[in-house]
Amino acid sequence: MSWVIDAQGLGKRYGGRWALKGCDLQIPSGHVVGLVGPNGAGKTTLLHLAVGLLAPTAGTLAVLGRAPAADPDQLARVGFVAQDTPTYARLTVADHLRFGRQMNPGWDDTLARQRVAELDLDLDQRAGSLSGGQRAQLALTLAVAKRPELLVLDEPVASLDPLARREFLQRLMEFVAEGEVSVVLSSHLVADLERVCDYLIVLVDSRLQLAGDVDDLLATHRRLVGPRRDPASLPSGQEVIEESHTDRQSTLLVRCDGPVLDPAWTVEELSLEDIVLAYMGQASSTRRARQALEVLS
Amino acid sequence: MIAFSWRQFRTQALIGGAGLVVLGIILLVTGPHLVSIYDTAVAQCRASGGASSDCNNPVISTYSKLQVLATALVLIVPVLIGMFWGAPLIARELETGTFRLAWTQSVSRMRWLLVKLGLVGLASAVVAGLLGLMVTWWYSPIDKVNQNRFGTAAFGLHGFVPAGYALFAFALGATTGLLFRRTLPAMAVTLVGFVVARWSVGFWIRPHFMTPVTKSFGIDPNGALGFSESVAGGSLQFMAGPPDIPNALIVSTGVVNNAGQAPTSAFLQKACPNLPGVNGPPSPVQGGQAKAALSGNGQQAFQQCITTISSKFHEVATYQPANRFWVFQTYETLLFVVASAALAGLCVWWVRRRLS
């Protein structure tokens, strides 16, 4: 099995603060991977490590089987669209295409020109005067026209309006559909990722909470509603992620390996967002518990 | 990578190049005129026995504003290069986040850094070097008159050493921009750092590039002479102005006897009993002015005083002679080039280790 990203105990510390800690992650190739988590969870750190902008403080990381940004060859295999889609404000769209061509031996100029034409970008317009959506599209064009094996996008749609957001993701998916490319994109909104991703990673508080195939996640998570009972009495193979109780009724969000057979439960299917939110909630309640313990001790 | 670095730098390069061309044309047009004034007016005046200071006036007063402008440009262009080419070079990319775009193309960030530093650094040295040589050529009649191009301030405005200054200012700007990650503070630090470096080298390091020549001179009764009383000890000192050595860099001067000792207070008070500032309250006397102020007896007393001092004491000067000018230009340029290379090395280390 070849991994797009293979991290073992990966960590990155800034001064005394761990931006990412103890991350074990193996992402198979050929997926569109959504990286989701609240702001400040370490998403950008993980992506910057993957493209070699940062070096790990702890652990190991291989991207497409090699150390990130090890040499020009490895750099050519990974395309990156950074947060806020930086471009050279004073250079024109045409200058940016020339930049891409001069900086990348594998540059696909036909693809780049075609995309720019489809987007109705004026070649002589300076990047600084493009709209946010156009700038993001230009940055995406630069990243895809180098023909990478892995495309990494850091919150590419965060600053876009809903229409530009949809158009951006649509263009991204067109590119993915064309060829053999793996994609990792991050967002703090599950809704953005739900439409495009088939693999999901949840990062909360610098730690990996969840990683898996979207279909598997949907198949193995269920909401159980039934008469009130102690979650500890569930059979093995059912792990409670989130629970809420009224006097008479319990609502549990569980991960289960097989079907739920207990007739006392009403079993409901979950949306991806439900699952993600449950894991995020679990992380924050763990943190609250940890903080409470620290206060007590 | 080179093509793209050039594209980023193009506008600045064109501004620098255009400025150089405009100044070059002005100097080319006016330069021969300055030479002809020197050749005719000054030569004729000297041939007919005029005092050299009067003869020099036509050259010194011609294009006096352009003289100031040209030398001022040689003085400030290096630091402007440091502030406007060096400081934003990396800082702007860090500020706007475009380094994340640049560093994720198929070019290693070391190559990105070295090409940027190399290209703009080379342009900096070329622009300032050409400027320095152009102005030196244009200024040559004035230098013939002034005989002072080795002077502490004048040295840096001549020859090719401005290329070294500009390279250093550029490297300093680029490095501080990289360390601070912001353009504006980097510009300020570059300005201050460059002035300090240039000043320190001019005053403390340059005079010692080679062992200076030591030579004795008789005390010139018409030169700048004076007494001073040190505030602390109350002891009296006799001072003579630097000897007139054309185009030399004077390192030190002193009035001493054959045993190498300076005249003592007691000796001076005995030799010059009636001079103001010697036995009375301190008031330093400058040669020419002092003589004019002293009338009759005073004038005579001053002459006697100088004669008495001259009989036992002479002036010793250490200096770098005129023929070392280009050697010193080379040494100082190399010094700044080496310092620039060290800064570039710091940039490489920082980009490799700290920005990851």
Image: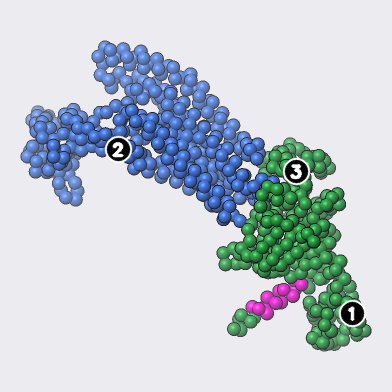
Chain colours: A green, B blue
Q: Can residue B229 be seen at all in this image of the molecule?
A: yes
Q: In the picture provided, is B326 more to the left or to the right than B125?
A: left
Could you tell me which chain the residue with mark 2 belongs to? B
Quadrant into which the N terminus of chain A falls: bottom right
Q: In the picture provided, is B129 more to the left or to the right than A124?
A: left
Label located before the other in sequence (3 or 1): 3
Residue that carries the numbered disc 1 in the rendered image: A260
Please tell me whether mark 2 sits on a helix, a strand or a loop: loop
Q: Are marks 1 and 2 in contact (CB under 8 Å)?
A: no
Specify few, some or many for label 3: CA neighbours under 10 Å numbering under 14, 14-19, or 20 or more.
Answer: some
Please tell me whether mark 3 sits on a helix, a strand or a loop: loop
Specify few, some or many for label 2: CA neighbours under 10 Å numbering under 14, 14-19, or 20 or more.
Answer: few
- The amino acid beneath tag 2 is Thr
Q: CA distance from mark 3 to mark 2?
A: 59 Å
Please tell me whether mark 1 sits on a helix, a strand or a loop: loop
Quadrant into which the C terminus of chain A falls: bottom right
- Residue at coordinates 27% horizontally, 20% vertically from top-left? B52
Per the rendered image, the range of residues in magenta is A279-291
* Mark number displayed over residue B211: 2
Could you tell me which chain the residue with mark 1 belongs to? A
Residue that carries the numbered disc 3 in the rendered image: A106
- Residue at coordinates 54% horizontally, 29% vertically from top-left? B19
